[in-house]
């Protein structure tokens, strides 16, 4: 789906400034997959309803070939977005899917799934993101659900020097591939030509960040280089964010959502509201009740 629209003229009256830049932590997960944890556990409260963002990108098969063998989740949603490479997904409900470049997998773990995410290639580049989106307390034990979104099912808004793939939420009149009622996530993948400017209205109460994965952009006077996350300040009365690409251009994701304001209790792949619910999740997993 492609939406051709006239270039947007600057329209924000009070764009948000950057609160701070974050450099992710290099780590590994699954069976030795190397990745950068951009949104770490200590930022869960600040970036509520987002719990985690991993960025992976490598040409070295040794960094990804082990994949993520069978593991459980409970209490939130995972959103996997591929830029390069192919990953095969299987889960305990019998679902099987293949992620290809530009595709998205949106999985609601709910009361529990066990799944694997394995590379379906022996060499070549693997690049993408996995974002964890929290569920409101009353939906944490909902039935598991998932959707594979093909690359051509992600709507694109095009402005002057800008292509915005609207994975979730709404941008410039384009409805994204996914909508969520309680957390109202916005998830854009942006390609900005050298010097291009992109504006996105945002409610000032929503938590928001930009992660630049190629090139560089600026938010007001603050440059945001590649491999940095800019947490956008929740300035009262602000009306959005204005991103201006550096002369080299930029690729970035812009993510925003409505905070849930509920307690967060995490133990590895389980994210609930209380310690007791975590103990229950571990018990259920050990007893085979997540499969
Ligand atoms: Fe997983």
Image (cartoon, rainbow, N blue to C red):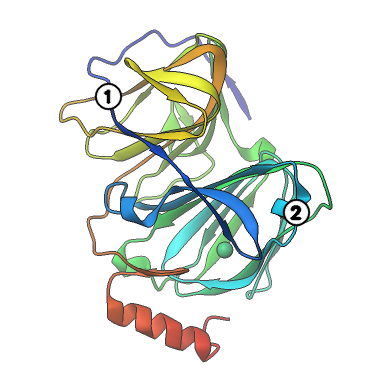
Residue at figure coordinates x 44%, y 83% from the top left: 282
Could you tell whether 216 is left or right of 204 in the image? right
**For the view shown, which residue lies furthest in the bottom direction?**
287
Residue at figure coordinates x 50%, y 74% from the top left: 112
- Measured in 3D between alpha carbons, the distance from the residue under mark 1 to the one under mark 2, in whole angstroms, is 39 Å
Q: Which numbered dot is residue 17?
A: 1
Whole-percent x, y for residue 197 in the image: 45, 13
When asked about the image quadrant of residue 97, the answer is bottom right
Q: Which numbered dot is residue 62?
A: 2
Q: Nearer the viewer, residue 84 or 92?
A: 84
In the depicted structure, whether residue 203 falls above or below residue 136: above
In the picture, which quadrant includes the C terminus? Answer: bottom right
Q: Taking the image as four quarters, which one is ligand 1 found in?
A: bottom right
Q: Is residue 248 visible?
A: yes
Q: Residues within 10 Å of mark 2 (few under 14, many from 20)?
A: few
In the depicted structure, whether residue 182 falls above or below residue 73: above
Residue at figure coordinates x 43%, y 11% from the top left: 8
Q: Are marks 1 and 2 in contact (CB under 8 Å)?
A: no
Element under disc 2: helix
Of label 1 and label 2, which has the lower sequence position?
Answer: 1
In the depicted structure, whether residue 210 falls above or below residue 147: above
Whole-percent x, y for residue 9 in the image: 39, 8
Could you tell whether 197 is left or right of 95 in the image? left
Element under disc 1: loop
In the picture, which quadrant includes the N terminus? Answer: top right
Could you tell whether 207 is left or right of 159 in the image? left
In the depicted structure, whether residue 134 falls above or below residue 281: above
Q: Residues within 10 Å of mark 1 (few under 14, many from 20)?
A: many
Q: Is residue 163 visible?
A: no
Q: In the image, which is nearer the foreground, mark 1 or mark 2?
A: 2
Whole-percent x, y for residue 48 in the image: 31, 51
């Amino acid at each position: 789906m492609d939406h051709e629209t006239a270039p947007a003229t600057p329209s924000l009256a009070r764009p948000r400034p950057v609160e701070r830049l974050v450099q992710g932590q290099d780590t590994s997960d699954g069976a030795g997959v190397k990745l950068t944890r951009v949104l770490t556990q200590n930022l869960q409260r600040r970036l509520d309803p987002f719990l985690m963002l991993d960025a992976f990108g490598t040409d070295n098969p040794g960094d990804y070939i082990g994949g993520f063998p069978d593991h459980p989740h409970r209490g939130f949603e995972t959103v996997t977005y591929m830029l390069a490479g192919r990953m095969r997904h299987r889960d305990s409900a019998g679902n099987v899917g293949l992620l290809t470049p530009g595709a998205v997998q949106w999985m609601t773990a709910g009361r529990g799934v066990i799944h694997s995410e394995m590379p379906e290639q022996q060499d070549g580049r693997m690049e993408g993101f996995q974002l964890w989106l929290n569920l409101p307390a009353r939906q944490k034990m909902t039935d598991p659900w998932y959707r594979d979104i093909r690359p051509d099912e992600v709507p694109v808004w095009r402005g002057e020097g800008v292509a915005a793939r609207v994975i979730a939420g709404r941008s410039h009149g384009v409805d994204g591939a996914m909508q969520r009622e309680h957390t109202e996530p916005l998830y854009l993948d942006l390609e900005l030509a050298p010097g291009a400017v992109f504006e996105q209205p945002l409610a000032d109460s929503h938590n928001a960040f930009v992660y630049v994965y190629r090139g560089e952009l600026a938010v007001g006077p603050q440059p945001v280089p590649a491999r940095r996350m800019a947490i956008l300040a929740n300035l009262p009365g602000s009306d959005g964010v204005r991103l201006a690409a550096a002369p080299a251009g930029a690729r970035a994701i812009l993510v925003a959502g409505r905070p849930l304001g509920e307690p967060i209790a995490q133990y590895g792949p389980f994210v609930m509201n209380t310690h007791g619910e975590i103990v229950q999740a571990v018990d259920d997993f050990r007893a085979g009740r997540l499969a």
